Amino acid sequence: MSGNLSVRVWRGRADGAFQSFEVPRYASQSVLDVVTHIQRKLDATLAYRYACRVGMCGSCAMTVNGVARWTCRTHVDKVAADGRLEIAPLHHLPVIRDLVADMREFFDKWARARGSFRGTKTRHDGFAAVSPASRKRRAIEAGIECIGCGVCYSACDTVAWNPDYLGPAALQRAWTLVNDVRDTANPERLRAVAGDGGCGACHTHLSCTERCPKQLSPTAGIAGLKRAVTMAALRGTL
Amino acid sequence: MSFRSQTLLWVAQRASAAVLALCVFVHLGVIIYAVRGGISATEILGRTQGNALWLAFYSLFVLACAVHAPIGLRTVLNEWGAWRGRGCDTAMWLFAALLAWAGMRAVMAVTG
């Protein structure tokens, strides 16, 4: 593999523009390698975010040729067959600078969806006995591996149209807690994920499920929340 | 509007969609069946007017439309028109009433 890549990189804030770079092409080169090359060899002022480089932390998520991806796990060969790359910050989030998106809104919505565990036991109590084969535990298993990278949020059309929408990751997190038999916050959690900004706003476009780098299905979790919220509304407990 | 009301609107739209699917199927099926040998408007009205079954069927059809369309339009206006809140909800109640009134007027003309 040789030659150069033509790379357009977003610079500045929301009113910024793309800047073009020529980057040497190598075998097994990741998009994060390309961004790092630009920052270290061509323009040290380029701002971007990464940490683990191996698909564990999710902090290097960016929009690559129009699609939200982890740049560390995206090979250039896979997305730039014609030798062209366009790299931008994640969609649907404010831009701090260059390729760095402001994730506060994303994580604030996790908190609004009551995405934190609330139990009653203390360290002096015994372990809760939860069968790994139980329906609820398996529902948790399907969504618990989310690392909060924001790719699903960036890929979701509803997030763009409805600023109140909590988004796929926060709703999936809520669904794992709804199924947690140890958790005691569920009545208020169901209220938090109901209504026009909650699970009912999901149009089941499946973009989140299509784009999730962990192959999770937030859509399935949201469908579960729709059922739970519907039952609560019909029972009058919402 | 409370979260419970918003959720019940969501449920009502799904439930009315299920009713509409059945109604459209019957409506189109009957049209295709009825006109296969040629039939005039007078002959159609002769069979539908005073018929309680068709009155009930098309009343259900109209009411399902009056429930389904305004809830969907509300979402479209919320998301694509950025029109939210009480003003939009009131307009949708009026739209539902208009659909129900105009629809039932047509139903009564055909089956009454």
Image (tube, grey):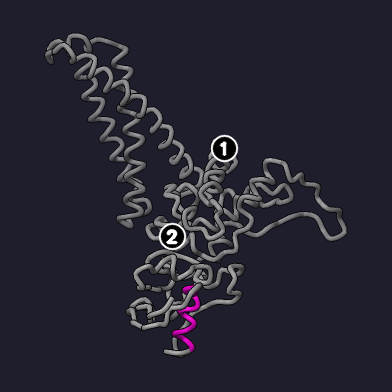
Question: Could you say whether the residue bearing mark 2 is in a helix, strand or loop?
Answer: helix
Q: On the image, which quarter does residue A64 sit in? A: bottom left
Q: Amino acid at mark 2?
A: Ala
Mark 1 crowd level (few <14, some 14–19, many ≥20, 10 Å Cα): some
Q: Residue at x 20, y 18 (%)?
A: B110
Q: Residue at x 64, y 55 (%)?
A: A144
> Left of A180 or right of it: where is B52?
left
**Which residue is labeled 2 in the image?**
A155
Question: Could you say whether the residue bearing mark 1 is in a helix, strand or loop?
Answer: helix
Q: Which numbered circle lies on residue A231?
A: 1
Mark 2 crowd level (few <14, some 14–19, many ≥20, 10 Å Cα): many
Vertical position of residue A13 compared to residue A130: above or below: below
Q: Give the x, y percent position of residue A48.
A: 48, 80
Tell me the CA gap for discs 1 and 2.
Answer: 29 Å
Q: Does the stretch in magenta take in A37?
A: yes
Vertical position of residue B100 compared to residue A182: above or below: above
Nearer the observer, disc 1 or disc 2? Answer: 2
Q: On the image, which quarter does residue B25 sit in? A: top left
Q: On the image, which quarter does residue A169 sit in? A: bottom right
Residue stretch rendered in magenta on the structure: A29-40
Q: Label 1 lies in what chain?
A: A
Mark 1 vs 2: CB contact within 8 A? no
Q: Amino acid at mark 1?
A: Met
Q: Give the x, y percent position of residue A114.
A: 61, 57
Vertical position of residue A14 compared to residue B59: above or below: below
Image quarter hosting the C terminus of chain A: top right
Vertical position of residue A56 compared to residue A214: above or below: below
Report the front residue among A73 and A223.
A73
Image quarter hosting the N terminus of chain A: bottom left
Report the front residue among A179 and A205.
A205
